[in-house]
Amino acid sequence: MSTPFRTLVKDGLWNNNVVFAQMLALCPSMAVTTSGTNGLGMGLATTAVLVVSNVLVALIRGVVSQEVRIPVFIVLIASLVTIVDMALNAWLHDLYKVLGLFIALIVVNCAILGRAEAFASKNGVWPSLVDGLAMGIGFTFALTVIGLIRECLGSGTLFAQASQLLGANFAFLEIRLHDHGGALLMILPPGAFAVLGFLLAGKRLLDARLEARRKTAAAIDTAPVEA
Amino acid sequence: MDFGTLKAHPLYQPVLLGAMALLASASLAWAANATRDAIHEAENRDLRDSLTQVLPEGFANNDLLADNALIDVGAATPLQVYRARQDGATRGAVFKVAGKGYGGEIILLMAIDRAGRILGVRVLKHTETPGLGDKIETAKSGWIERFAGKALETAHWAVQKDGGDFDQFAGATITPRAVVKTVKDGLETFARHQAAILGEAAETPIALKVEGAK
């Protein structure tokens, strides 16, 4: 069984997006997305862990038996996250201070175990790597979008403190839209639920439109040509 | 015996789990060992940075990190104090205080001069709501800087909502209230144990006291 890489990428980014389609990992998606920068940081850290865990799981998939696969994967993921946590703390300390709180949360991100179980344990190393990368980027995209919407409505900024996460060169990303504060509700947990709900509805609407258009196009193609 | 039959053996699963756990522990131990010094160094650098931030420039010229003492202030854990000296003369002290915020413990570092005036306060660690309570960080807003120059008797130690001198920020009252209370507690601790904190009391340091207590 092998899926073309193009499909893997499309699935990860849109069709089977972790947040918008699989609706997994909703806890980090809502808890940390109080700003675009937070969403981006959490997404990138998760992507890194997801890619490595997918590759490792694909490597050991022949040795691991069906019955104990879940504990084996959990031990693997937890160790991986702890090592990433320590390495960031030691050598990228400034980044760690921004992301620190989120990194430990990656262990309980069910998207990672989900991909290990659903994909990497049944596929080779290369497809698993591509899948991890695509799913991770899709997750980052979702978190950044939710974060940006909440930040824009809630505090009137975009990518505030991006330079703390990405370095001083990215200070241009930080935009102040207005100084009136904003709807506090959007920063609080209810704002996360509301934004996610609207985004999910929006994606379904868009998919339904696209599907309808494809159907009419197909109907026109197959319709008999009238003289 | 091929791999398939080996895998079907009842002992295969516990051995596999055990081997995985052993591998994981070994790699964690190795990683902890490899990062220990770097993490320790980074944390010390952070502490040194915070120490210089809470003190006005040119206030002290000693190595504060090395010039520390543990003082018994009647709390469960002794107070770790760093002393600020200019050419040997003690000018003030820096210590950590902890309070309870909205999301958990807030740990502050505060510097006080000999007269009991605050030189500066910084947040070392907190778990307040991102985007709301985290305005106590200097990276997010300058709120915490308004403590500088205040003393126990020259301010009303409460947020404005409670009739005090310190403004709360929109949507978060518990966090600033906790910080104000914690700073006030710190000032009171200082007032009660000023001589010991500044290292000018006849009191012996705790380490010696414990030995002599036998």
Image (cartoon, coloured by chain):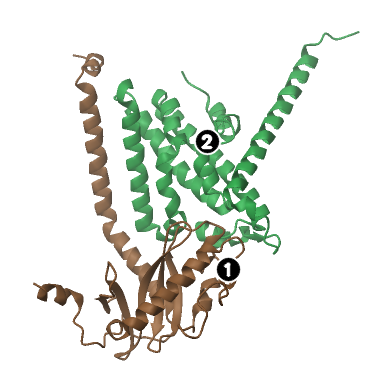
The colour chain B appears in is: brown
**Which mark, residue A134?**
2
Q: Amino acid at mark 1?
A: Gln
All told, the count of numbered labels is 2
For label 1, the residue is B168
Left or right of B193 in this view: B56: right
Q: Nearer the viewer, mark 2 or mark 1?
A: 1
Chain under numbered label 1: B
Q: Residues within 10 Å of mark 2 (few under 14, many from 20)?
A: many
On the rendered structure, is B32 left or right of A53?
left
Q: Where residue B41 appears, x then y in whole percent? A: 31, 65
For the point 24% across and 36% down, which residue is it? Answer: B21
- Give the residue drawn at x 60%, y 33%: A14
In the displayed structure, A181 sits above or below B93; it is above
User: Which lettered chain is shown in green?
Assistant: A
- Tell me, yes or no, whether dots 2 and 1 are on the same chain: no
Query: Closer to the camera, B35 or A188?
Result: A188
Residue B137 marker: none
User: Is B197 or B109 nearer to us in this picture?
Assistant: B197
